[in-house]
Amino acid sequence: MTPSPFDLQSPEAYAAWRQHKLVAPAPTEAALIVEIRDPRALTPAEHGAMMARIRQWNMVLYAGTAVGADPGIPRQLGAQFGLTHLDANWLADEDGISTISVHEGGTREAYIPYTNRPIKWHTDGYYNPPGRPIRGMLLHCVRNAPTGGDNRLMDHEMAYLLLRDQNPEYIRALMQPDAMVIPERVDEVDGVRPQQGGPVFSVDRADGRLHMRYTARTRSIAWKQDAATRSAVAALEVLLAQPSPHIVHTRLKPGMGLLCNNVLHDRSGFADDPQHPRLLYRARYLDGIRG
């Protein structure tokens, strides 16, 4: 069996992977963007250009001409990259796609993605059980806000690399099965969501890829209270707070979208236009991107 580069007991495998990872330049918004015609039916050249960026940086931004409100767009685009198993969370629409817009009143108002408030660094589905990780994620913009609603993006593999280079013990701590715990939640509609613990970094048994489960939120989150975990979490917070060539700033516009292997991302707050409110479609997948 080939040693995993993410195994702390395999420094040679890590060194080879690290060297390969650092061959690619740090991503920029311009480098990540692929101009496409129709996301529902990519040309071979468009698909190839998108896959090249995903192989380098685990993400790609696309800019297309499909600007209408069609929830079929993320579903049809994702299928072209092997993404077929949607994680239909309880706030998603019947087809498993989430319509992300500001909701005033009702259940969604209590959840930050459905407000205009900023969202801190996270990977999607961090509250899912270990057996149901979100491997792929897609955001498609129908309408943006007049101001704000920007995203920062960071390849989770690069976050791992930078932390491991600082101190391998950070990785050891964040790979503990009880490193990060989401407390039990009781909701009138959703019922009881049991307490869910798990690691921040783990190796996917399905394909050997690195998976990251993380949120920078400070409420409804409990970190393991040992010195190693506290130090590792603090180091990760500093890594994400300071300027870095590995952090990409972008603002999705109509027809644009993000396709990724669930990389780290955040969202700034925004001022909405009530006549033309911000609208995005979000699809979360149990699959990783293939192509």
Image (cartoon, helix red, strand yellow):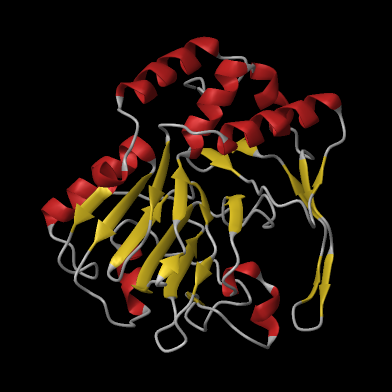
- Residue located at (44% from left, 81% from top): 273
Side (left or right) of 25 relative to 85: left
Residue 180 in which image quadrant: top right
The residue positioned farthest toward the right in the image shown = 225
Q: Residue at x 35, y 31 (%)?
A: 26
User: In the visual, does 158 lie left or right of 178?
Assistant: left
Q: Nearer the viewer, residue 9 or 89?
A: 89
Res 6 visible: no
Task: Please state the horizontal and vertical placement of residue 208, each as a whole percent of the image.
Answer: 50, 35
Q: Farthest residue in the top direction?
A: 12
Q: Position of residue 105 (x, y in %)?
A: 67, 88
Q: Is residue 117 left or right of residue 186?
A: left
Relative vertical location of residue 41 with respect to residue 174 in this rendering, above or below: below
Q: Nearer the viewer, residue 287 or 120?
A: 120
Point out residue 31 in the picture as x, y percentages from the top left corner: 25, 42
246 displayed left or right of 52: right
At 36% from the left edge and 62% from the top edge, which residue is drawn? 252
Where 206 falls versus 282 (above or below)?
A: above
Residue 69 can be seen, yes or no: yes
Q: Residue at x 18, y 48 (%)?
A: 48
Which quadrant of the figure has residue 115? bottom right
Q: Is residue 207 above or below residue 188?
A: above
